[in-house]
Image (cartoon, rainbow, N blue to C red):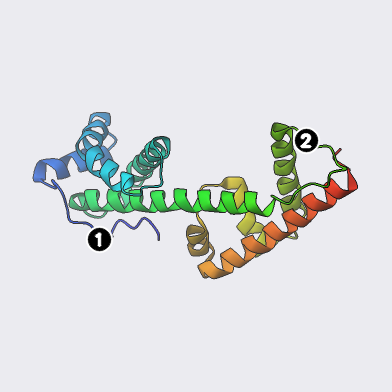
Amino acid sequence: MADSPAERSFPQVGETDAFADEVRRATQGESSAFGELYRRTRPLVARLVAGFGTLDADEVEDVLQESYVRAFRGLPRLKEAGAFTPWLLTIARNRARSKLERRTALRRMEDALADPEPETVPALPAALQVERDIAVVRQLISELPEGEEKKTVQLFYLEGQLSAREIAEQLGVGKSTITMRLERFRGRIKRELLQRVLAGRWD
């Protein structure tokens, strides 16, 4: 879901005339107004993000920082100063969901790469294995023909800022289409890594 300034799925909290004035001042770039908005809204946003119970403390803080960066950058697009709090909460909710989706995608990738190595192939040190796996992913992406699939995996794996849902919205397709493209690409990664292990040709 896009971080729409018009979204009002949360009740407005503390949107007094003085608060709305702080929003307008922040929109004009006044640094003290940014600090005041952060101070007044952070407890509410933190409670929302902490409600995503599987996020650890560091992830919660990451989501908070990402949410405020997005909100403050997007202030010129906010049509009504009084809608700042529900808009900010919507952004935070979307950031938390994206964080969880990226973690799930990473775990699925790790599961896909978890085939046991043949006993005849010496095990690589973990750090070196990860580095080489990442290199394979980048190489496979670069070798893809130009098109929607390449654009999808670049957005998901190389840029790493968008969830599958957000990529679908950006590219104008259904989320299931994005999921199918990512699954197909993971299959390529799995096959390539397995072939390299079996061939013993890690250069």
How far is mark 1 from mark 2, CA to CA?
50 Å
Q: For residue 20, what is the image quadrant?
A: top left
In the depicted view, which residue is nearer to us: 103 or 15?
103
- The reply, left or right, for residue 56 in relation to residue 39 is right
The tag on residue 9 is: 1
Residue in the image at 17% along x and 51% along y: 82
For residue 201, above or below residue 171: above
Q: Give the percent coordinates (x, y) of residue 23.
A: 21, 42
Residue 40, can we see it? yes
For residue 195, above or below residue 131: below
Q: Which residue is mark 2?
A: 124
Residue in the image at 79% along x and 37% along y: 123
Precedes in sequence: disc 1 or disc 2: 1
- The reply, left or right, for residue 23 in relation to residue 169 is left
- Image quarter (top left, top right, bottom left or bottom right) of the C terminus: top right
In the depicted view, which residue is nearer to us: 50 or 154?
50
Question: Which element type, helix, strand or loop, lies under badge 2?
Answer: loop
Question: Which element type, helix, strand or loop, lies under badge 1?
Answer: loop
Q: Amino acid at mark 1?
A: Ser
Question: Can you name the residue that lies furthest to the front here?
Answer: 119
Q: For residue 62, what is the image quadrant?
A: top left
In the depicted view, which residue is nearer to us: 11 or 103?
103
Residue 75, can we see it? no
